[in-house]
Amino acid sequence: MIGYSDSGKDAGRLSAAWQLYKAQEELVKVAKEFGVKLTMFHGRGGTVGRGGGPTHLAILSQPPDTILGSLRVTVQGEVIEQSFGEEHLCFRTLQRFTAATLEHGMNPPVAPKLEWRALLDEMSVIATKEYRSFVFQDPRFVEYFRLATPELEYGRMNIGSRPAKRKPSGGIESLRAIPWIFAWTQTRFHLPVWLGFGAAFKHVIEKDIRNLQMLKDMYNGWPFFRVTLDLLEMVFAKGDPGIAALYDKLLVSEDLWPLGERLRSKYEETKGFLLQLPGTRIFWKEIHT
């Protein structure tokens, strides 16, 4: 099983997605060596922060030789209705899975170049460091998170199949991925999806300006990287840090406001770097002009 939710919560989306990609490649090598028919089980959630996204793109962006005509997926509770709630939706969903699975086998995605892999390895280290410096190492982050979002209220609603936390007294590490993602979605800030990307972009571009062109080449030539950035862009198009700032003013104590302002600054920085990579985005301009 390829698990997207908790890996993203622990390391940030960029690093988690890239490590899962490489893990699948290693599994394929072992399966080929021992003659095992391998079927990947993708434990995706409904939202981008939990590995979600358009089914067709998600399948076509998987590493070469990881599907080979079969796969298994989790359809999470929050998207069951929209995918299987009516007969015509059910058939459409199954058609998408079938078509993408066949296409992946008949027209496999290209494998990333060695220099692309090296650059993304470097970016993932920086992204994880940035992500964890806020989420796990800032001594007041948990306090801020619980004041600025409805995470505690979600836990009392009893709308999930499992408790919101693995340990009632624990911090972010004990919180399940669903309330973690939903709480940030409620404030329109989507922090688990983008935090870390900006620092990674900034590091490699400032290190060597030629890396900007390499990132553009990666976007144009590598389905995995393109889908990763497209989903990030989609989340930014939905996001609104102004709403998150209103939550802060209403619910967060003034001594924690600087932390929220730092995070919103990171949001804007990340958006700026993202817009440099694939060039002008028509969709983005339509949303924000």
Image (spheres, helix red, strand yellow):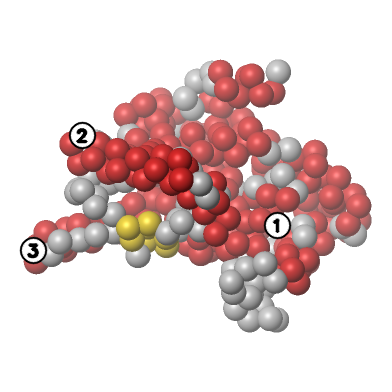
Mark 3 nearby-residue class (10 Å; few <14, some 14–19, many ≥20)? few
Q: Give the SS element for disc 3.
A: loop
Q: Which residue is mark 1?
A: 183
Amino acid type, residue under disc 2 in the picture: Asn
Q: Which residue is mark 3?
A: 35
* Foreground of the two, 19 or 88: 88
Q: Position of residue 288 (x, y in %)?
A: 69, 23
Q: Give the SS element for disc 1.
A: helix
Give the quarter of the image for residue 168: bottom right
Instruction: Tell me the CA gap for discs 1 and 3.
Output: 44 Å
Q: Which residue is mark 2?
A: 107
Q: Residue at x 28, y 54 (%)?
A: 71
Label whose residue precedes the other's in the sequence (1 or 3): 3
Mark 1 nearby-residue class (10 Å; few <14, some 14–19, many ≥20)? many
Quarter holding the N terminus? bottom left
Q: Position of residue 24 (x, y in %)?
A: 28, 56
Amino acid type, residue under disc 1 in the picture: Ala
Label whose residue precedes the other's in the sequence (2 or 1): 2
Q: Label 3 near label 1: C-beta < 8 Å?
A: no
Q: Residue at x 60, y 53 (%)?
A: 192
Q: Give the SS element for disc 2.
A: loop
Give the quarter of the image for residue 202: top right
Q: Position of residue 116 (x, y in %)?
A: 32, 38
Label whose residue precedes the other's in the sequence (3 or 2): 3
Would residue 253 appear left or right of 25 to someone viewing this image?
right
Instruction: Tell me the CA gap for discs 2 and 1.
Output: 39 Å
Q: Position of residue 209 (x, y in %)?
A: 46, 28
Instruction: Give the numbered dot on residue 265.
Output: none
